[in-house]
């Protein structure tokens, strides 16, 4: 039953869900299009990874104090996750974009060859797999994800103190 009262766990988990959900209205404001698939996608504004780890770190700080070992562990964990979101994962997404473009160019070249004339468009499309390009985050997305997590954890903590 102690697990149900674990504030850092719930603050981090709900911050992730909040950051994923808020992507839909933010996307709508920017594009005037509703895209519910953003709730389960990686990348985008704000970073739910950053929101989760900063909510975790902030709630550990509120619970155990800035001088605790647990705070140090969660802070280093947050730094690694946010660095990875802007570094390795973002680069993988940019490489996916280049590979997808190469795939489209290659497909166009192949479609011009007479061998492919008898195939339907759908058959040609099925031979190429598009890679997911939105894997990582821009630094601003990580920043606002981190800010979201901090604000979320502090607000949740203040709400629970009142109750």
Image (cartoon, rainbow, N blue to C red):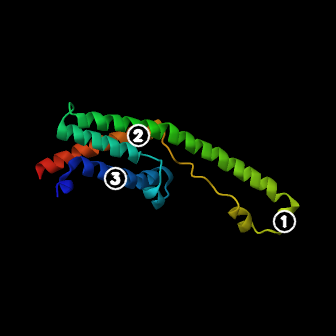
Q: Secondary structure under badge 3?
A: helix
Q: Which of 91 and 26 is in front in this view?
A: 91
Q: Which of marks 2 and 1 is nearer the N terminus?
A: 2
The quadrant the N terminus occupies is bottom left
User: Which residue in the protein does label 3 denote?
Assistant: 18
Circle 1 crowding by C-alpha within 10 Å: few under 14, some 14–19, many from 20 = few
Q: Secondary structure under badge 1?
A: helix
The image shows residue 132 at horizontal and vertical percentages of: 57, 52
Q: Up-down: is 3 above or below 88?
A: below
> How many discs mark residues in the rendered view?
3
Mark 2–mark 3 Cα distance, whole angstroms, equals: 18 Å
What residue is rendered at 21% in x and 32% in y?
66
What residue is rendered at 51% in x and 39% in y?
88
Mark 2 vs mark 3, foreground winner is 2
The image shows residue 136 at horizontal and vertical percentages of: 50, 44
User: Which residue in the protein does label 1 denote?
Assistant: 117
Q: Residue 53 carries which label?
A: none
User: Which residue in the protein does label 2 denote?
Assistant: 81
Mark 2 vs mark 1, foreground winner is 2
Circle 3 crowding by C-alpha within 10 Å: few under 14, some 14–19, many from 20 = some
Q: Up-down: is 122 above or below 99?
A: below
Left or right? Give the position of 125 relative to 77: right
Q: Which of 81 and 98 is in front in this view?
A: 81
What residue is rendered at 48% in x and 38% in y?
86
Mark 1–mark 3 Cα distance, whole angstroms, equals: 49 Å
Q: Up-down: is 112 above or below 158?
A: below
Mark 1 vs mark 3, foreground winner is 1
Q: Which of marks 1 and 3 is nearer the N terminus?
A: 3
């Amino acid at each position: 039953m102690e697990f149900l009262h674990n504030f850092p766990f719930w603050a981090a988990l709900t911050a992730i869900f909040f950051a994923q959900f808020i992507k839909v209205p933010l996307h709508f404001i920017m594009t005037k299009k509703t895209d519910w698939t953003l709730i389960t996608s990686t990348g985008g504004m704000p970073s739910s990874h950053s929101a989760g780890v900063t909510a975790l770190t902030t709630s550990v700080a509120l619970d155990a104090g800035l001088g605790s070992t647990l705070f140090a562990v969660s802070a280093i964990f947050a730094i690694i996750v946010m660095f990875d979101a802007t570094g390795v994962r973002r680069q993988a997404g940019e490489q996916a974009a280049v590979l997808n473009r190469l795939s489209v160019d290659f497909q166009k070249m192949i479609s011009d060859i007479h061998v492919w004339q008898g195939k339907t468009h759908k058959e040609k499309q099925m031979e190429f797999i598009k890679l997911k390009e939105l894997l990582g985050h821009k630094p601003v997305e990580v920043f606002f994800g981190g800010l979201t997590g901090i604000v979320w954890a502090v607000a949740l903590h203040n709400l629970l103190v009142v109750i």
